[in-house]
Image (tube, rainbow, N blue to C red):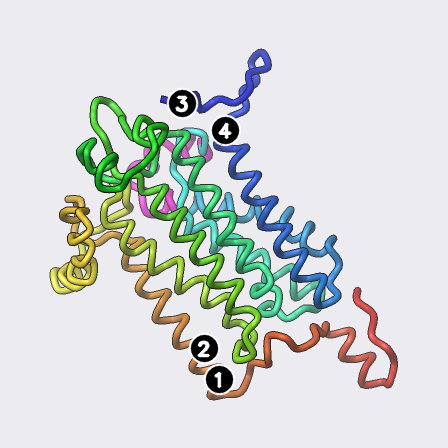
Amino acid sequence: MLNPIAISLGPIQVHWYGIIIGLGALLGLMLAIREGKRFGISPDFFMDLLLIGVPSALIGARAYYVAFEWSNYKNHPSEIIAIWHGGIAIYGALIGAIIAAVIYTRRKGYDFWRIADFCAPGLITGQMIGRWGNFMNQEAHGGSVSESFLRDTLHLPNFIVNQMFIDGQYYHPTFLYESLWSFTGLLVLLWIRRRSFLRTGELFMSYFIWYSLGRFYVEGVRTDSLVFEGPPWLASLLKGLWSPMSSFGWGAMEAGKNIRISQLLAIMIILAAVAFIIVRRKQKKSIPYSSPVETKNSVGTALRGQHPQEN
């Protein structure tokens, strides 16, 4: 097992997990700043957005997890804030970050969907890198597999195979599946955002569609999924949609209660994102992605015949 602690300074320990998450956030910020500059948006705007978004995402991620695991926390309220004991959810982080971003962009006078589009490649970059923090902690892995599956089927290097050996058993490197899926998604988003057909809000929705599609299939082999007991027809539908993964040697879905929350949410997000794109195009509410960015203040000054300045 690799040492999850990068630096020890007396009683202070710096974990690789935090370093990796921070690196992912930094690279995501750089991508957003670079794209924002093309449209005349100050880097300070995205830096402030990150400072507001990160703690909001952390609170959302913890609140989401606690809400679905309330039976384990209601008798131990002190554990609710003990995030260092584990227990956060990426969809909760997205909810928290989006709420903060909506409030911040509106206060600054920007259209939320324009800013969300600029941040989409950065979001998936953060997730691509952040999953390696799970690798260092030997967490968020999948079900048990054979060593030969990792070495001979997946052809993984020794350092990954060795890190996937936990308590005498090898496990699915689901961190790697999601990281590679996110890397491919980053390339797709970077390609899409230069296409003439793209309209506002659609790059952000494309991010949700891509990430949720990959998360649906990876979630099927996770051993730490949030679950609930739902109707059998819904469970059968989800298992049927997941079944093609068995041809990749993933075996059957991990046992447990019949509905995995992240799988159900992934399907709902994909449907909602597609509907969002269709409705906005029919209602002609969106403008081309390449259009100049305007704020409420800049629109007002333009109407008065003055030159707008970014606030």
Label 2: which residue? Answer: 277
**Amino acid type, label 4:** Trp
As rendered, which of 19 and 176 lies closer to the eye? 176
Mark 3 or 2, which is nearer the eye? 3
**Span shown in magenta:** 65-82
As rendered, which of 30 and 8 lies closer to the eye? 30
Label 4: which residue? Answer: 16
Label 1: which residue? Answer: 281
Q: Tell me, yes or no, whether the two marked residues, 3 and 2, touch with CB atoms within 8 Å.
A: no
The percent position of residue 180, horizontal first and vertical second, equals 39, 49
Tell whether 16 sits left or right of 223: right
* Relative vertical location of residue 149 with respect to residue 263 in this rendering, above or below: above
The residue furthest top is 10
Q: Residue at 29% of width from left, 50% of height from top? A: 218
Label 3: which residue? Answer: 2
Mark 1 or 3, which is nearer the eye? 3
Q: CA distance from mark 1 to mark 4?
A: 44 Å
As rendered, which of 157 and 54 lies closer to the eye? 157
Tell whether 196 sits left or right of 143: right
* Element at label 4: helix
Structural crowding at the residue carrying mark 2, measured as other residues with C-alpha within 10 Å and reported as few (<14), some (14–19) or many (≥20): some
The percent position of residue 281, horizontal first and vertical second, equals 48, 84
247 part of magenta stretch: no
Tell which circle, 4 or 2, labels the residue nearer the N-terminal end: 4
Q: Tell me, yes or no, whether the two marked residues, 4 and 3, touch with CB atoms within 8 Å.
A: yes
Quadrant of the rendered image containing residue 12: top right
Predominant SS of the magenta segment: helix
**Amino acid type, label 1:** Arg
Q: CA distance from mark 4 to mark 2?
A: 39 Å
Q: CA distance from mark 2 to mark 1?
A: 6 Å
